[in-house]
Image (tube, rainbow, N blue to C red):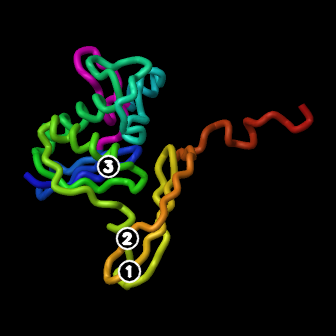
Amino acid sequence: MIGIIDFNDWELVITNAEPVRNKKHYAAAAKGPEEMLFSEDALALCRINPQLVKTQYLRKLSADPLSNPINDAKNHADLIFHHLSRMKEQSGVSRCVMAISEHYTDQQLGLLAGIAEAAGIEVLAFFNNALRVGPKQSMDFEFLDLGLSHACTTSVVFREGKLATADCQILDCLLYTSPSPRDLSTSRMPSSA
């Protein structure tokens, strides 16, 4: 079955012809009692013991070793392999187009293509998110892609009837979706303390 895998720094979203099998997989991996845990299962463990959960492997997309390996996953590439294998098993997608963030290098895309192939997924094409959401008119624009660990700005230009990426800048950031109790003014120390 052919699908689209949207690959960013905090989740993998798989879309195919069977909406009931479409699913978001959060970028979280943890060591379980018998097998690796991913997505919601890993996030549930994260609430209990956050040190046991890896959440940066999609952003890092490398063969760099993990400080604490998870089962037989020794590096970030191994975690991505296991995550894609699990997604293939659950969704039935064996061929895909990957929508990727524009900050990935050619080397990282080569690594991702190899990981997908090893997981039994044929990547038909990589598609740049900035070009995917471009306006219908022939115009230049700026695209801002916000992730949990970084933001990426891309300048897209329209030249000779085609959209092309002109410039890409990556900014490290940390976003969160719910306020922390520390953010409440009643929980702060008075300025006189």
**What's the mark number on residue 7?**
3
Which callout, 2 or 3, points at the residue further toward the start of the chain?
Answer: 3
Q: Is residue 29 magenta?
A: yes
User: Which residue is at the front of the view, 185 or 130?
Assistant: 130
Query: In the rendering, at what x and y percent does residue 142 appear?
Result: 49, 70
Q: Which residues are magenta?
A: 25-42
Q: Residue at left 59%, top 44%?
A: 179
Label 2 sits on a secondary structure element that is strand
Which residue is labeled 2 in the image?
Answer: 164
Which callout, 2 or 1, points at the residue further toward the start of the chain?
Answer: 1
Mark 1 and mark 3 residues within 8 Å of each other at the beta carbon: no
Name the mark nearer the viewer: 2 or 3.
2
Q: Residue at left 45%, top 22%?
A: 48
Q: Amino acid type of disc 2?
A: Ala
User: Which residue is at the front of the view, 125 or 84?
Assistant: 125
Query: In the rendering, at what x and y percent does residue 136 appear?
Result: 34, 81
Cα distance in 3D space between marks 1 and 3: 27 Å
The answer to whether 139 is drawn above or below residue 62 in the figure is below
